[in-house]
Image (cartoon, grey):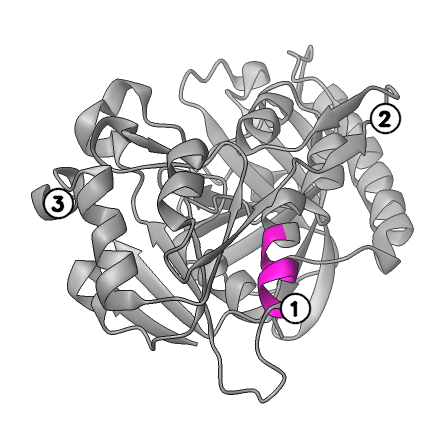
Amino acid sequence: MTIFQGLQGLRQLSAGSVLSIGNFDGIHRGHQRILEVAASLRPRSGSGRVAVVTFEPHPFTVLRPEHAPPRLTPPELKRELLAAAGVDDLVVLPPVPEVLNCSAEAFWQILRDEVRPDHMVEGDSFTFGRARGGDITRLRQWSAGSGVSLHVIEPVLVALLDLRVVPVSSSLIRWLLAHGRARDAAICLARPYVLEGTVVKGHQRGRTIGVPTANLACDAQLIPADGVYAGRCRVEARDYPVALSIGRMPTFGENARQIEAHLIGFDGDLYGKVLRVEVLDWLREQRKLPGIESLKAQLARDIESAAQRFDLAAGEPIARAG
């Protein structure tokens, strides 16, 4: 996959491409449907290219930082998933004045007159341009008779574990994870949610009680609700079950929120490595235990539960490309 930067990079796309524009945070089932349609529109000759234009980071990080949504997908994983979905070209638009001040009309003119795609594929809630001045209605009007065929994709509906049928969106996935509903998030993503972080030194208490943990520093990514989860992590081409703890370590009276992953069966040094931990299932809430022996007994139960969930997840899709 070829990566272009900024509006100048956008202008470098090959004419006649199949184009989709959006944040694509999560690459969830709705995004996957857009990409499937885009791939199906590629000319049979193989000469056409599928191109995605995305904003990185989210424009709100500059315009309204207090409202910027925490990201679901770290940039590198996002690129891997887009490439695996058949995207040939990726244009990354940063939140700089040249991009943020571009009106919807001016942006459309760049697409129509300079990029000249054959097709555009968008969701029905698509907006673009300064102050979100463009929407799918205006794009329909502008594309009519322009030589650009617009394909509007309806929301993808899924049934959650409580049997409610809902349209998939990045906002919904954030809400589900904020309430610990990892399995429902996985339904929307078509794979487990991934936490990516660098292993840093923590208090090292786990090692003293026979349960060493990797303390993860996850940059600007949405962290699921406090609790203990079953997870999965690949290290050196092997998948390990993970007992994942997110919270403030109430038994030890800690206040700082931490993400600790115990890789079951792993023995080695992980400091400084970047790990991707797939969050498979909620196990229990965080709670203060009366002492170390009670904690050790509870951790043993958590590890057993996490290993069982790992076995059940053996056939589930993973958030890796290759």
* Mark number displayed over residue 161: 2
Q: Where is residue 202 in the image (x, y as percent from the top left)?
A: 42, 39
Circle 3: residue type: Val
Which mark identifies residue 40? Answer: 1
Circle 3 sits on which residue?
Answer: 96
Q: What element carries label 3?
A: loop
Magenta span main SS: helix
Q: Label 1 vs label 3: CA separation?
A: 33 Å
Locate residue 129: give its quadrant: top left
Q: Residues within 10 Å of mark 3 (few under 14, many from 20)?
A: few
**Magenta stretch holds residue 180:** no
Instruction: Give left or right: position of 257 versus 13.
Output: right
- Span of residues in magenta: 34-40
Closer-to-camera residue (218/266): 218
The picture places residue 237, in percent across and down from the top left corner, at 66, 75
Above or below: residue 127 compared with residue 112: above
